[in-house]
Image: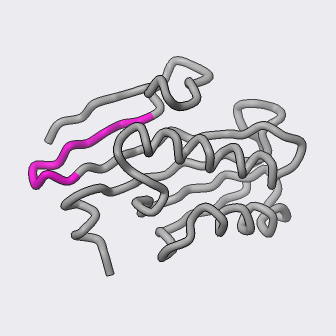
């Protein structure tokens, strides 16, 4: 197993001293991608969610993956009452079998204007085949 930390130039750059992607090369040839939490811009959860999924898509593509490879998604919201607009945007981007999921309400996020933050794990190659239904 080999781990590589990365901030792909083709994706949004991090807002602090951290890596956007941890790429775990497995011994069987598969790859696991752990993406840092993403926030979006805009005045409402739908706009921020759209920006988040666009950023996640860019990060995944930089590593040869797509949103279809996502196996786990974690969502942090400052108001769980905004779940419906988030879920609608999420369904636009995650169109296949839904990944495992955790959604929690938090009192605040690291940026005052952030209403939502999402991180994902994706599996590509042999690892992806081993988790298919």
Specify how the rendered protein is coloured: one colour
User: What is the residue that sits farthest to the top in this orientation?
Assistant: 17
Point out the residue furthest to the bottom here: 133
* Numbered-mark total: 0
**2 within the magenta span:** no
Which residue is rendered at x = 62% and y = 45% of the image?
A: 54
Q: Is residue 25 left or right of residue 39?
A: left
Q: Nearer the viewer, residue 132 or 3?
A: 132
List x then y, in percent, for residue 71.
Answer: 41, 63
Residue at 24%, 69% in the rendered image: 129
Picture coordinates of residue 97, whole percent (x, y)? 48, 76
Rendered view: 12 above or below 16: below
Left or right: 84 in relation to 25 = right
Quadrant, the N terminus = top left
Q: Is residue 7 left or right of residue 111?
A: left
Residue 95: quadrant of the picture? bottom right
Of residues 2 and 41, the one nearer the viewer is 41
> Residue 43 vs residue 95: left or right?
right
The image shows residue 98, relative to residue 20, as above or below, that is below
The residue shown at (82%, 32%) is 112
Tell me residue 114's x, y (percent): 78, 39
Going by the picture, which residue comes out furthest to the left? 27
Decide whether residue 23 is among the magenta residues: yes
The picture places residue 110, in percent across and down from the top left corner, at: 70, 32
Part of the protein shown in magenta: 21-30
Q: In which quadrant will I find the C terminus?
A: bottom left
Q: Establish if 21 lies above or below 48.
A: above
Q: Which residue appears at 19% of the width and 61% of the height?
A: 126
């Amino acid at each position: 197993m080999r781990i590589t930390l990365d901030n792909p130039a083709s994706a949004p750059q991090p807002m602090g001293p951290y890596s956007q992607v941890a790429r775990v090369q497995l011994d069987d040839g598969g790859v696991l991608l752990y993406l840092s939490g993403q926030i979006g811009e805009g005045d409402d959860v739908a706009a921020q969610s759209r920006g988040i999924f666009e950023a996640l898509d860019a990060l995944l593509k930089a590593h040869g993956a797509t949103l279809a490879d996502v196996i786990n998604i974690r969502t942090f919201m400052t108001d769980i009452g905004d779940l419906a607009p988030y879920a609608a945007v999420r369904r636009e981007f995650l169109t296949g079998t839904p990944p495992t999921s955790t959604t929690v309400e938090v009192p605040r996020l690291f940026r005052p204007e952030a209403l939502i933050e999402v991180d994902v794990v994706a599996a590509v190659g042999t690892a992806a085949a081993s988790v298919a239904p």
